[in-house]
Image (cartoon, coloured by chain):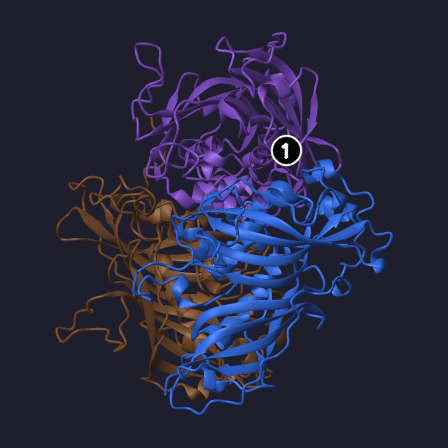
Chain colours: A purple, B blue, C brown
Amino acid sequence: MTKTNPGNFFEDFHVGQVIEHATPRTITDGDRALYGAIYPTRFAIPSSAEFAASVGLAEHPVEDLVAFHVAFGKTVPDVSLNAVANLGYAECRFHRPVLTGDTLRTSSEVIGLKQNSNGRTGVVYVRSTATNQRGEVALDWVRWVMVHKRDADAPAPETVVPEVADVVAPDDLVLPAGLDFSAYDTTAAGEPHRFDDYTVGETIDHVDGVTLSESEHMMATRLWQNTAKVHFNTEARPDGRRLVYGGHVISLARALSFNGLANAQLVAAINAGSHVAPAFAGDTVYAWSEVLDKAAPAAWEGTGVGALRLRLVATKGRDETTTLRGDDGKYAEGVLLDLDLWALVPR
Amino acid sequence: MTKTNPGNFFEDFHVGQVIEHATPRTITDGDRALYGAIYPTRFAIPSSAEFAASVGLAEHPVEDLVAFHVAFGKTVPDVSLNAVANLGYAECRFHRPVLTGDTLRTSSEVIGLKQNSNGRTGVVYVRSTATNQRGEVALDWVRWVMVHKRDADAPAPETVVPEVADVVAPDDLVLPAGLDFSAYDTTAAGEPHRFDDYTVGETIDHVDGVTLSESEHMMATRLWQNTAKVHFNTEARPDGRRLVYGGHVISLARALSFNGLANAQLVAAINAGSHVAPAFAGDTVYAWSEVLDKAAPAAWEGTGVGALRLRLVATKGRDETTTLRGDDGKYAEGVLLDLDLWALVPR
Amino acid sequence: MTKTNPGNFFEDFHVGQVIEHATPRTITDGDRALYGAIYPTRFAIPSSAEFAASVGLAEHPVEDLVAFHVAFGKTVPDVSLNAVANLGYAECRFHRPVLTGDTLRTSSEVIGLKQNSNGRTGVVYVRSTATNQRGEVALDWVRWVMVHKRDADAPAPETVVPEVADVVAPDDLVLPAGLDFSAYDTTAAGEPHRFDDYTVGETIDHVDGVTLSESEHMMATRLWQNTAKVHFNTEARPDGRRLVYGGHVISLARALSFNGLANAQLVAAINAGSHVAPAFAGDTVYAWSEVLDKAAPAAWEGTGVGALRLRLVATKGRDETTTLRGDDGKYAEGVLLDLDLWALVPR
């Protein structure tokens, strides 16, 4: 009998099933530095321990997306090793900043199943929760993914499609303990624009582009212990190309968004996300954002913190017109990523 | 007179000679992270400080092979800068886990010399010992390497060929202080297979492959301060290709072996090793293992620890038949590495 | 109105203007490791905490050039985003070693302006100062850069060309607190050559070469938060090539200079520097040095420290003849970098 992990197929999942994912992973300053070597990030809180202290944080967190990628990577061997496609994210909330020395582990509960009409694949919905060494929730999220069946003749399970929120309600966003933007230093942060300077409907072309090369995306994807073969092995796809991990495009777009959103310091939630098209080495990735909403929950009174709901779009080739969809309602040529998130900014 | 290091030639070595190698090197969490960015490793002990503590380790060690590469790299400028080929390893024992903050230095004693019949090269045998900042041995090993003579007319030294053990005896393996697998968590570690689940003669196809690209092998090799020109300089070889450091293939194969050997947590010894063929960027590397032996020394009673002696084979292209040698007794096409090691697993 | 940073144009600068640059950046052991993965550096002080302690340093500093690149990178968005060329450096002094945990920020004062006769560009002179979290100066330097005008019709400012020293006077070099080379261990450091072994006018061919690949220079440049588009984006230049950050060539040449200058442990000052020609992935970079001067200020009596003034030259392709300029007085074919620095060596 083989000892190697074949991954789960559609018929291996059942609603209510809880999967404890291997392997716990301790975050270090090495992750911090590699993140900065792989993505052109300059947000002042993860960049500077002094800045983090100046806004009330007791310790120096790493980028929120470091936690996201590590936590997410753990689910791959159990949830998406036999995936056809990553269909969506929802209700991803960041409950506390992740610090160097924190050890993250992730578990997932299957909350929905729906076999496709072709009988060869099905959609699995999971709610995943990453906790630290004290058992505190660091982040949680829902994702759904299309997975191969092992056996097309296996009977279809009862269809259960969970309700997921289109957007995390502002009152459900979690402010990191101690966060206080009252004395926020826009000069150190790099831009003057605050909460009131952004208007719903406004779009921001982030201008800068990065041409992908083969090593960085593989280094990042390995760092998160994501084992999906297509990212590393030219023999795993008919076209002989290595597919760039979708999360690499998320982090790249987020880093590029500094130029215009330098004060969108922390990601509080990811409301939704679509990997619209695959990215490959040689592609030059740009980004633009649209302000979808603004919120300042009453409970945040006195903290100086507001939240911007942002659509963050990554494109292959720069699109100064910031066009998401064509007249046919389909994503415009060149769109790679359409991400909907809440970010915390100074008021 | 030139101030640059020409390296030692065959006639510069004499039996009994002790070489203190430059340059001491402090291990940090940056090395830990880079190792994880360069190799797809997921072994739970080096991945998680919590997991390491749960098996009795007082501090969070880095991968054993980090220590091996750093210690080995120090010997290159003195021992193998003028090497034709790295012929073999033996008796490599890991005496204690290496922790962040440890500073390693290496010294080597020449224990054998044998001039080749062509008169232009000779084989140098050295026993190398890496110690930490407290003078404690971290690891030691024997290797032999074919080195150019500076002057073909220089007289041949007396031939001394040391006896080296084919395999480190199980009683000579060193358990890290405090290691206790009694409460070992196979869920967190990623696989259920324990000592008793492995059978001598069993082979395991590790399934996954990684296509080498140019930057990662150079970054790793530099990180270990290995200065051999052929790894970095396209002008150093007639074919204009950069040769991948053999240790890079060792670490890659070891990381790939997680899939089927996730509980082979620690490397206790390397019994032998052959770099069968060179590897280059563009090659896709796979691995398989054979269980050569099992041991549970009486002194380990109560620790829950057993040892598997494993042949770890790296191949260019996947070999699901796990074929080491052809009918002619020669290594099969595609074999890159044949490594013989002891690993510690839970009973 | 756009929220993205267009950078400053020539007419945005005025003499006496002080620019506080974003974003403060904390140095970690991750930076130390990445520096060692990207450059083949082996200088014993940054390599080994034990060695650093043995020469009187209270803590383990990172490479001086880590501090230089981080400090320099901060100035790019404000000073050189619209630069045509980086024309020169002067009076760069390292005031104290930078330690892990230090947070650097940089400010610049405009000390000179000179519009070019073409009316479309001008030269901006700035004195930049990087300070740590205690407000202590880590390093400072002067650089001048040719910057585009936004509007060719904008009036020329009064021409002010600052006087800068050709070389930092030895008495102005700063010894790190506690530095004492009296018990310096040349074996651990890797070479026997001390202050008295170097002669003014001597040249040293550093022998080794490294072929540049695309990922490493981008990772380094991002790590320093340097945002100049030409280093990352193949669409930013007509030739579709990514230009290697000049500082990458500086660090590479400095690392290669270990072979012959292993005891030139610390950089005390950079007197001048010219990026003579651009470098690209695929180029093989070599280095040679010339001893320009030697100094041992009276104030250093008893420390065992001397200073070598070195010309460090990086070339594309090895030049064993160490030829800086041709008969026409122009830089010789293949010269990439001409850097003039003071390094601290044991007497």
Where is residue C148 shown, x and y percent of the image?
23, 46
In the foreground, A112 or B291: B291
Q: How many marks?
A: 1
- Viewed as shown, does residue A163 lie left or right of C339? right
Given the current orientation, which residue lies at the most extreme front position?
Answer: B327
Residue C110 placed where, x, y %? 34, 53
Identity of the residue drawn at 58% across and 51% down: B254
Depth order, front residue of B88/A274: B88
Q: Quadrant of residue B136?
A: bottom right
Q: Amino acid type of disc 1?
A: Leu
Which residue position holds label 1? Answer: A179
Classify residue A344 as left or right of residue C72: right
Residue at 46% from the left image edge and 34% from the top image edge:
A230
Task: Judge left or right: residue A100 versus residue A308.
Answer: right
Residue A328, position in %: x, y?
Answer: 31, 9
State whether residue A235 is above or below residue C30.
above
Residue at 41 percent across and 16 percent down: it is A201
* Picture quadrant where residue A270 is located: top right
Query: In x, y percent, where is residue A179?
Result: 63, 33
A54 is higher (above) or lower (below) than A179: below
Residue shown at the point (59%, 52%) measured from the top left: B32
In terms of secondary structure, where does tag 1 sit?
loop
